Amino acid sequence: MANMRATVFLGPGKIALQEKPIPEVGPGDALLRVTTTTICGTDVHILKGEYPVAHGLTIGHEPVGVIEKLGREVKGYQEGQRVLAGAICPSFHSYACQDGVPSQDGQCHGHGYKPMGGWRFGNTIDGAQAEYVLVPDAQANLAPIPDGLSDEQVLMCPDIMSTGFAGAERADIKIGDIVAVFAQGPIGLCATAGARLRGAGLIIVVDGLDERLAIARKMGADVTLNFRQVDVVSEILRLTGGRGVDASIEALGTQGTFEAALRVLKPGGTLSSLGVYSSDLRIPLDAFHAGLGDNRIVTSLCPGGKERMRRLIQVLESGRLDLGPLVTHRYPLADIVEAYELFGSQRDGVLKVAITP
């Protein structure tokens, strides 16, 4: 059996590029030759040991590539075709999928399902930071890439774009709403873009890096606040005449950003949480209005499946949004450990790193 190079989790703080067998293709699978992938903040949580995965697992969950081999039951695709698959690759057979929550597509065996069960790449099965990745339930998850779009233009679709947009969608933003987005990393920037596409009338964004705030303006932000220079809660309440925002989106995963997002909400507003939290959250009694503020707190795990990916690709192909500029650094797979060090330290203005096997 032929081998490939893959980025393997070896324990907290340790990953390595190792040789692994190229996966065997089952009837409903597709084997992708990965042409571009990237590193996600969740991968950094895995590396730090803050999110548990199995020793020896290939990590990464954002594959863009070419179909190398198709299972015999997969129809409508052909070998050699450029495709991507979402970070969440639901089967659409589970109770969660049929109940309208495909991201929670746990594999049911009579004992319920594992939360975040739809996230399989780099979580429960080998992932995309490798020369090849096996896509399960390929019929439901492969999305063709139009010839006019490059790998880097669609690289945000599998996770970052889908997650950021989900934050705006779950916030139920209406035309003319005032929205605050806390943190302008890649997911926060996509949430800002999603709020604009949803018709928000005023978008206020918060970050501590002026260069990210500048990018946020290009994504649709109307007001940018650097939390190192201003009390953002007081300023947002001032900007809204004390009314508060209709929706706030938390895109970092810390107590501070979550609490600030809660404190700026109007009565009846929605806090849409996208952050991956590594410790318990505390909800302050006053900010929560003792539970009497008619507020909603909602969470999202990045929607997947081929129709979700088609819709995201359509937004890019139409020219309504260009996420190519979010790719700030490029590394070959051979230098994946160095790429993790850069991305994990958030230095040199890094937003997203393109990894090319």
Image (cartoon, rainbow, N blue to C red):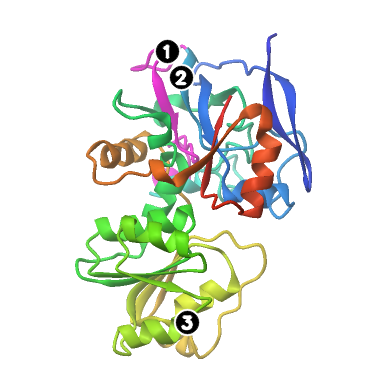
Q: What x and y, as percent, mark residue 20? A: 72, 21
| Mark identifier at residue 278 | none
Q: Earlier in the sequence, mark 1 or mark 3?
A: 1
Say few, some or many: other residues with alpha carbon within 10 Å of mark 2 (under 14 / 14 to 19 / 20 or more): many
Q: Earlier in the sequence, mark 1 or mark 2?
A: 2
Q: What stretch is highlighted in magenta?
A: 72-98
Q: Residue 285 lies in what quarter of the image?
A: bottom right
Q: What x and y, as percent, mark residue 184? A: 46, 61
Residue for point 61% across, 32% down? 129
Which label lies toward us, 1 or 3? 3
Q: Does the magenta stretch include residue 291?
A: no
Residue labelled with disc 2: 66
Q: Residue 305 lies in what quarter of the image?
A: top left
Q: Is the magenta stretch mostly helix, strand or loop?
A: loop
CB atoms at circles 1 and 2 under 8 Å apart?
yes
Give the answer, above or below, for where 211 lies relative to 135.
below
Q: Which of marks 3 and 2 is nearer the N terminus?
A: 2
Q: What x and y, as percent, mark residue 355? A: 56, 33
Disc 3 marks a residue whose amino acid type is Val
Whether residue 70 is visible to the viewer of this picture, yes or no, is: no
Residue for point 44% across, 46% down? 326
Which label lies toward us, 3 or 2? 3
Residue labelled with disc 1: 80
State the separation of the CA atoms marked 1 and 2. Answer: 6 Å
Say few, some or many: other residues with alpha carbon within 10 Å of mark 3 (under 14 / 14 to 19 / 20 or more): few
CB atoms at circles 3 and 2 under 8 Å apart?
no
